[in-house]
Image (spheres, rainbow, N blue to C red):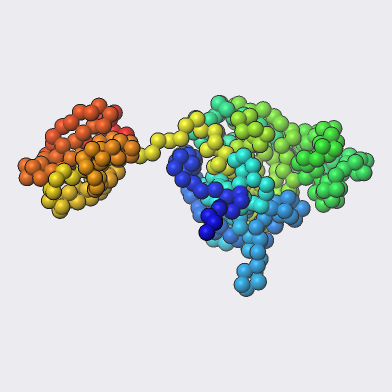
Amino acid sequence: MSIIQPVRGTHDLIGENQRRHSHVVSAARRISALYGFGEWSTPIFEDTRVFSRSLGDTSDVVTKEMYSFSDRDGESITLRPEGTAAICRALVTNGLTQSLPQKVFYAGPMFRYERPQKGRYRQFHQIGVELMGAAEPQADAEVIALGYQILQDLGVAEHVTLELNTLGDAASREAWREALIAYFSRYKDQLSEDSRVRLEKNPLRILDSKDRSDRALVADAPQMAEFLTPEASTFWDDLRRTLDNFGISYRVNTSIVRGLDYYNHTTFEFVTDKLGSQGTVMAGGRYDGLVKQMGGPAVPSVGLAAGVERLSMLLDTAPESARPVIIVPVGSPAEGTVFKVLQSLRQQGVYVEMGYRGSLRKRMERAGKQNAAYVLFLGEDEVERGVCRIKHMESGQESEVTLDSVLSDAATFFLSGEKAAI
């Protein structure tokens, strides 16, 4: 029979890949907790309206990339393509809009039907944070600082640049929108077919176009900075001043836009040149109108998300796997004693495996292949005397200690000092 391969655009997380993945998620979870973000987990699939409302019916995600299907009751269900909309839905349906602010961390798989490429998959994984219920620019700066600290903790911040832009407030955005319609209407016959549709429904999305002819027109399009209201200008100035106070450098990039009306003020991306042309590793911004689209009140919010696969690729090395203590019975010691030691060490937090089979030489070879930190020998003589022998694998040194001391204080022998790498 032929071997069944994984579905195109998916991948298994095993060995080094899994260690990289877990390291990124653990770092993000730990840093987010330092900033007061608690973890939420939402379903992998949602009512399709959660995403069609939040992403817009003209977006590529909705029209081309969502995994949507009808269940047995005829309900339209979608595998989540991103995390923010589901978090906002959860805020509303769990009655938390009266308990603000809410600071949320999430991690998990997302799904998009797109062309697989380096670091991008049809099932991919994201970490993200959402700060809901805070309207101040300091909240935006705090989310950006959190993201930057995650990158620092992973040791990749030096390879990443923060790019920043403003979308202004609603009045700024409306004035800009009208100016864009007037500008692009003059060149309508030069726009791509997709952008002609966007001109009628959502002209800001033309600014995201990858079409070469569209890009040439976008280069001379009106800039948001020309239409900022005094209030929006103050918000923009306060954000940058707060980032300066955080000691976070940035580069203004006016081409970073978001096409949907619920986005406002801050938009940002952490980008790198280490992953080819697809250089964004973390992105976010302010979305004061999204919770209202989920049926709740207007809740000012800001957040970020990052692809775990792409962050994993930036790591210089994979985290080392845990190093075990291997128990090697020598001869035929009392079985009850051997398993008592095995379980006692595990209950004290020591990673332990049993070397069951083969000659002593074979079992030591296997211990070496497992990168064991220590080998603990238990023979009939040792059990009778109430002792065991411990070999430190890196130095080759052996010592004899009492079984009682190992059973009562494993940390002294296996979890403390420079020798402990388990």
Counting the numbered discs, the total is 0
Residue 142, horizontal then vertical, whole percent = 56, 37
Q: Position of residue 317 (x, y in %)?
A: 47, 32
Q: Quadrant of residue 303?
A: top right
The answer to which of 294 and 369 lies nearer the viewer is: 369
Residue at 48% x, 48% y: name it.
38
Q: Quadrant of residue 252?
A: top right
Tell me if I can see residue 82 in this picture: no
Residue at 54% over, 36% down: 313
Residue positioned most to the bottom: 73
Q: Is residue 70 left or right of residue 23?
A: right
Q: Relative to the observer, which residue lies in front, 181 or 351? A: 351
Q: Which residue is most to the front? A: 1
> Which is nearer the eye, 15 or 258?
15
Where does residue 224 sit, x and y in percent of width and height? 78, 36
Q: Is residue 402 visible?
A: yes
Which residue is rendered at x = 46% and y = 45% of the image?
A: 14
